[in-house]
Structures are given as structure tokens and as C-alpha cells.
């Protein structure tokens, strides 16, 4: 049998082009495997071969979703593949969004099987897991060694058109698809068994997980802006020059609170970004581009808003877990509540 | 963070961000689309005055979001 033709999608980093300074490169292709693709090729041997790799910068892709998707589709299609593999993206948000978008578009347009890999908290996972197979991976590239065999295995099964098992058996993120099967035990017996396990405090697996609606109801609008105290919060890592709290450039273990009373403008000499997930050149030159203190002060002087809160809060949203983000926001929120702020502007990069 | 702040502080929160689909998926209620990932509220290609005007327009939209009652997720 002829080898199955695979195209692999990678970002600029795994495509070995460069880091954040190359995150805005437009899509292009290279024949054969690159980076993680060579590891996939090793697992596959002669059965499947990566005929081409399509590489695109994460920032370019996310800022130009529609055109970037079209460009990537054209490059992928030119190789006439039987299967597309993207990533794995681990917990990289922009990369995960790109992998998900590319897979979903290729599946729809080229009608071939697609698969990618992500950490379950990646926003791309939430967005695309219903449409495509996403192999569950660890949260960083340190887990490449375990991610590659899992991705290679699922890709092989999809390419060969084999019957797909449950998410738990196959290691992909649940897609919300229900399949009718004959079970040797009838439902009532299984339910009683599960109940007994629950009563005994033993672990059990539900057959019908309830969806999690993690939504917050929108709070009523500010009635009179000219009397309102507005606070600034950012996940873009803006800190006083020198990063006094040593907030980490990724997987931040803390947030910082910084006094801006009397400060009308963030300058190159006084503020910078601690964020390691985007090109810091623009924010280091003028941090108002991420945290708009200059504009807020102007609007305060003009009486458009009542007051800019004296303290702003910052953390680095780069591979930061949902649990930690929630924890930091709770702590920040409790302080802001005591200060009776009327509204919050949260900026993200 | 946006959701937790809205819940804890019990005031409206607006998310200024470039990749709107992420914000929508995560569940921010008020969303104000920004310019670019490394400079959400700026554009280094503009001159200083133009850039300040651009930033002002994004902040004004954020304030409009905070002072607008909504019943569901809204991209301003």
C-alpha cells in the first residue's frame, strides 16, 4: 500500500523560524517534516509520510483569522494530503486557536481527517473540541515525548478509517458525541452500582456528565461615568521598570499591585512588560499601549470619568492555569471591592 | 479573570483584547476589540498624536461598554 500523505501545521516556534519576534510571519510551506514532524515520522515509519509542513506565525494567524485560514488551506491543499496533523499546541493559547481553526477548516473544505493535540485548558480546545479530534496533552512542550506517540496513534487510526473508541480509551478530548452501544448490564443495574460506589465514597465514572456552565451574569451598567471610579487590570504583564515583584514571564505565580497616583503617562524609563508570550518591543517602548494610563488620565481631567483608581493590578497571562487566574482575580477583586470601584477595564495581549 | 472580577467586585468589567473569539469562548460579558496582540491599545506605525487618538477611541468604547446595560455577551 502506498504511504498515507500527511501535511503538518506548525507555528513559527516549532517550525524553527524563531520566537515572538517572528510571530507575525505569514504562512509558507516546506517539503517534508520539520521539528515535531520528524518525531511523528519516526513513530509512523513507512506507513505514513509527512509530505509537507505549513508554518505560520501565531500572532499573524490570530490577528487575521479569515485570510490566514484561507492561505493555510491553499498551502495544505497543494500537497493533496490524506490527513492533516496540527501541533501539538500544549497550553499555548494563540497556537491552540490556530491549530483548531486550521483543522476545522481543512476538515470542512478538503474533507480529510484532521487531528491536533492540546492541553485541556487551552482556549483552542474549548473552542474546537466539538468539531475535531484533539489529543489530550500536558501543558508544556516538556511533555512532547508523551504527546507525540499519542498524536501519531490517533492520526493513524483516523487515516485508516478505523472505528474510534471513547475519549477515555483513545485519549482525545470529549466531543459531546453520543453513541448507542449494547452493554452487558442493563441501565438500572449500572445506576444502582454507581449509587453504591458513590455512597461508599469510591470513585465512579458517570455515563452522562452534566455540562458545566461557567458563566457570570453581566452586572448592570454604570449610571454616571463622570462620578465613577474605574480601575485598570491587565494580564499583559505591565510592571514598573525592573519588575520589582519578579513576576514570571510565563506560568506567573503571582500578581502585582502598583500605585499610579500622580502618574500621567507610562514611559520607556518607568514601565515595561514582564510578559514572555508576545514581542515586548512595543510595550517596553510605551506601556500605555497595553495599560492606557495616559488616556484614562486625560478622560479624568476632562471629567468624562470620575476617577482613575490609584492602584492598578497586573499579572502575566502566558500559560497561566485557569485555577491560578481565578485565584489572582479573586484576590484582586476583594481589594477592588473594598475600594468601592464602579467598573473595571481589563486589558489582555 | 474577567468573570471572576465581575463576580467578586459585583461591578461591570470590560475585556479589551485582540483575539475576540478567545474572550467569547471564555465567557467575558463585555468585549472591546483591540488592535494587535503585542500592542492592543496602540499602533507603533502611527505618529504620537494619531496613536493617542486611536487609544482614546478604544478606551471610550470600553467606557461605553461599562455604561451600557446588556443581557448577554456583547462585542462592542
Image (cartoon, coloured by chain):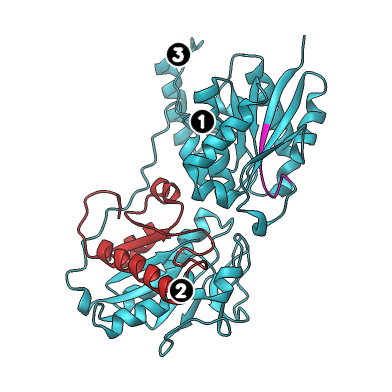
Chain colours: A cyan, B red
- Disc on res. A180: 3
**Of labels 2 and 1, the one closer to you:** 1
**Of labels 3 and 1, the one closer to you:** 1
Q: Name above or below for residue A187 compared with residue B70.
A: above
Q: Residue at x 50, y 56 (%)?
A: A323
How far is disc 3 from disc 1 in space, using C-alphas? 28 Å
Q: Position of residue B15 (x, y in %)?
A: 38, 60
Label 2 lies in what chain? Answer: A
| Residue at which label 1 appears | A105
N-term mark: 2 or 1: 1
Mark 1 neighbour class, 10 Å CA radius: few under 14, some 14 to 19, many 20 or more? some
Q: Position of residue A311 (x, y in %)?
A: 42, 81
| Label 3 residue SS | loop
* Magenta segment: A8-15
Furthest toward the bottom, the residue is A262
| Residue at which label 2 appears | A313
Q: Residue at x 49, y 60 (%)?
A: A325
Q: Residue at x 41, y 16 (%)?
A: A187
N-term mark: 3 or 2: 3
Q: Name above or below for residue A298 compared with residue A233.
A: below
How far is disc 3 from disc 2 in space, using C-alphas? 50 Å
Q: Is residue A284 left or right of residue A261?
A: right
| Label 2 residue SS | strand
Query: A250 or B32, which lies in front?
Result: B32
Label 1 lies in what chain? Answer: A
Labels 3 and 1 share a subunit: yes
Label 3 lies in what chain? Answer: A
Q: Is residue B71 left or right of residue A210?
A: left
Amino acid at each position: 500500500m502506498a504511504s498515507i500523505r500527511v501535511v503538518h501545521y506548525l507555528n513559527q516556534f516549532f517550525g524553527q523560524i524563531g520566537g515572538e519576534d517572528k510571530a507575525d510571519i505569514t504562512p509558507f510551506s516546506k517539503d517534508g517534516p520539520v521539528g515535531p514532524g520528524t518525531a511523528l515520522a519516526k513513530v509512523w515509519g513507512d506507513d505514513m509520510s509527512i509530505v509537507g509542513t505549513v508554518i505560520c506565525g501565531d500572532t499573524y494567524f490570530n490577528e487575521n483569522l479569515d485570510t490566514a485560514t484561507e492561505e493555510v488551506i491553499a498551502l495544505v491543499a497543494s500537497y493533496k494530503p490524506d490527513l492533516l496533523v496540527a501541533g501539538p499546541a500544549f497550553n499555548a493559547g494563540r497556537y491552540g486557536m490556530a491549530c483548531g481553526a486550521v483543522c476545522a477548516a481543512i476538515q470542512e473544505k478538503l474533507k480529510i481527517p484532521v487531528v491536533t493535540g492540546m492541553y485541556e485548558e487551552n482556549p483552542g480546545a474549548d473552542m474546537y473540541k466539538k468539531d475535531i479530534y484533539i489529543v489530550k496533552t500536558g501543558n508544556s512542550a516538556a511533555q512532547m515525548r508523551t504527546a507525540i506517540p499519542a498524536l501519531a496513534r490517533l492520526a493513524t487510526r483516523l487515516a485508516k478509517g478505523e472505528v474510534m473508541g471513547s475519549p477515555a480509551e483513545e485519549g482525545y478530548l470529549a466531543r459531546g458525541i453520543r453513541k448507542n452501544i449494547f452493554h452487558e448490564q442493563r441501565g438500572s443495574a449500572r445506576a444502582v452500582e454507581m449509587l453504591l460506589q458513590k455512597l461508599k465514597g469510591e470513585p465512579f465514572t458517570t455515563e452522562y456528565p452534566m455540562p458545566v456552565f461557567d458563566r457570570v451574569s453581566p452586572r448592570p451598567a454604570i449610571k454616571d461615568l463622570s462620578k465613577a471610579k474605574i480601575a485598570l487590570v491587565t494580564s499583559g504583564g505591565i510592571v514598573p521598570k525592573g519588575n520589582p515583584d519578579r513576576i514570571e514571564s510565563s506560568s506567573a505565580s503571582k500578581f502585582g499591585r502598583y500605585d499610579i497616583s500622580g502618574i500621567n503617562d507610562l514611559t520607556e524609563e518607568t514601565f515595561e512588560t514582564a510578559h514572555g508570550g508576545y514581542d515586548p518591543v512595543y510595550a517596553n517602548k510605551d506601556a500605555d499601549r497595553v495599560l492606557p494610563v495616559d488616556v484614562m488620565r486625560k478622560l479624568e481631567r476632562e471629567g468624562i470619568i470620575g476617577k482613575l483608581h490609584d492602584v492598578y493590578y497586573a499579572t502575566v497571562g502566558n500559560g497561566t492555569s485557569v485555577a491560578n487566574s481565578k485565584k489572582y482575580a479573586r484576590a484582586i477583586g476583594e481589594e477592588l471591592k473594598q475600594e468601592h470601584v464602579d467598573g473595571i477595564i481589563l486589558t489582555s495581549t | 479573570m474577567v468573570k471572576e472580577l465581575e463576580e467578586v467586585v459585583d461591578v461591570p468589567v470590560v475585556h479589551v483584547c485582540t483575539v475576540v473569539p478567545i474572550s467569547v469562548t471564555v465567557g467575558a460579558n463585555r468585549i472591546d476589540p483591540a488592535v494587535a496582540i503585542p500592542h492592543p491599545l496602540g499602533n507603533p506605525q502611527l505618529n504620537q498624536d494619531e496613536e493617542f487618538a486611536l487609544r482614546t477611541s478604544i478606551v471610550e468604547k470600553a467606557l461605553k461598554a461599562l455604561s451600557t446595560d446588556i443581557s448577554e455577551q456583547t462585542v462592542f
